[in-house]
């Protein structure tokens, strides 16, 4: 468990137990965290591999998982597409031997990839396991995570094609990370006694007594990319400013399909009447309105993902969405996507 997790859980437990906070102001507020809640928090993996669960996965297994759940956003070979930056590329055999990426130091790479920057293989394992796939974070098993990471490491020529990554040999893989010697730890984020990476002087004169929060965008541009408040992944306490056009909210009760959009994260890429990453739902409805096979075709596209119909940006497969919800969304799209 990381120090951050320990402190956070300690605060939760203390708060729940009624420990005096701010001279007793919040006595009795909250409750102790349950073992299940503690376990849900305690999923981080440290650079010394504390917290790493047992498991294993081969490069070949990782390729299968990658093709089904990762390639639509990151490319078949980690080269990415129009959405995300490349994961693989920019490293050499010499980098693996020395532990410092030459192109990163010289600054002559056209783009910095993940394998160029990351110093600890545990960081990759941790992030994949807790945050991927984008549309269904925390859905990969430990073995799937080992396999996907093995595939990425093989693409970067860090491990061979027949390699099986596991909790027993991952420390040896760390010794071959191209930028393993590129981490700086003498700063306040790593060591409490380290030097901060910023310098400033506290100013306590002419302080504002009232602060008004607002967007710096002009009103006409606020909804250029849809409502940002609706474009968060539905995991954790996420927030975003409402940037929809003034008066755009439906006056009557919203259509049930709008709740399905939020529930399944559709609004992260799609809006009802405007293109974001993917097409507007109303544009989809117009294109397929007179197509008798559209209902089954769109349902299959939602479940299986794909690209090409609306440009180069791929749609990840949404296999986690139930058939009933898929059917309801498709019928709503083909009906013109009414908001009430």
Image (cartoon, grey):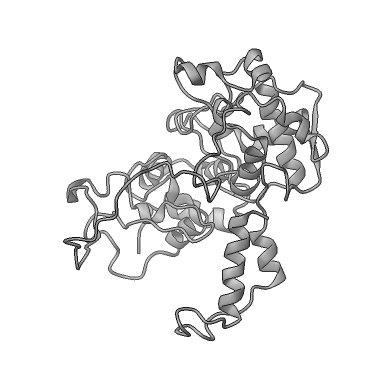
Visible residue check, residue 322: no
Residue 209 position (above or below residue 143): below
Q: Give the left or right position of residue 205, taking residue 258 as reference.
A: left
Where 3 sits versus 279, above or below?
below
On the rendered image, what quadrant is the C terminus found in? bottom left
- The picture places residue 125, in percent across and down from the top left corner, at 67, 40
The spot of residue 15 in percent (x, y) is 56, 77
Please tell me how many numbered marks the rendered image carries.
0
What residue is shown at x 40% (from left), y 55% (from top)?
230
Q: Position of residue 311 (x, y in %)?
A: 43, 29
Res 131 visible? yes
Q: Is residue 23 above or below residue 80?
A: below
The answer to whether 252 appears left or right of 191 in the picture is left
Q: Nearer the viewer, residue 131 or 25?
A: 25
**Nearer the observer, 261 or 86:** 86
Q: Residue at x 45, y 14 (%)?
A: 108
- Front-most of 62 and 188? 188
> To which quarter of the image does residue 172 belong?
top right
Residue at 19% across, 63% down: 208
- Furthest toward the front, the residue is 193
- Quadrant holding the N terminus: bottom right
Residue under the image location 37 percent in, 56 percent down: 240
Could you tell me residue 304's position as x and y percent?
A: 60, 40
């Amino acid at each position: 468990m990381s120090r951050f997790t320990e402190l956070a859980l300690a605060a939760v437990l203390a708060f729940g137990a009624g420990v005096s906070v701010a001279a007793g102001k919040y006595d009795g507020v909250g409750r102790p965290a349950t073992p299940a809640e503690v376990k849900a928090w305690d999923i981080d993996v440290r650079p010394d591999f504390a917290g790493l669960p047992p498991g294993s996965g081969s490069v070949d297994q990782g390729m299968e998982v990658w093709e089904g759940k990762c390639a639509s956003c990151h490319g078949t070979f980690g080269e990415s597409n129009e959405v995300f930056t490349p994961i693989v590329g920019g490293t050499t055999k010499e980098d693996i031997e020395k532990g410092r990426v030459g192109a990163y130091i010289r600054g002559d790479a056209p783009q910095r990839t993940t394998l160029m920057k990351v110093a600890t293989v545990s960081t990759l394992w941790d992030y994949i396991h807790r945050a991927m796939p984008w549309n269904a974070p925390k859905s990969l098993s430990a073995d799937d995570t080992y396999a996907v990471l093995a595939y990425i490491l093989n693409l970067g020529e860090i491990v061979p094609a027949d390699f099986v990554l596991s909790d027993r040999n991952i420390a040896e893989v760390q010794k071959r990370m191209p930028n393993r010697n590129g981490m700086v730890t003498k700063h306040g984020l790593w060591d409490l006694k380290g030097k901060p990476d910023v310098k400033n002087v506290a100013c306590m004169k002419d302080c504002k007594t009232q602060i008004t929060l607002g967007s710096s965008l002009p009103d006409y541009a606020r909804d250029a990319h849809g409502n940002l408040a609706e474009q968060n992944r539905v995991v954790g306490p996420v927030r975003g400013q409402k940037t929809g056009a003034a008066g755009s909210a439906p006056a009557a009760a919203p259509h049930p399909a709008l709740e399905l959009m939020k529930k399944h994260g559709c609004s992260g890429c799609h809006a009802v009447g405007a293109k974001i990453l993917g097409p507007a739902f109303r544009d989809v409805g117009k294109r397929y309105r007179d197509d008798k096979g559209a209902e089954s075709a769109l349902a299959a596209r939602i479940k299986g993902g794909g690209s090409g119909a609306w440009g180069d940006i791929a749609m990840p497969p949404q296999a986690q969405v139930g058939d009933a919800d898929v059917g309801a969304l498709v019928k709503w799209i083909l009906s013109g996507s009414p908001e009430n």
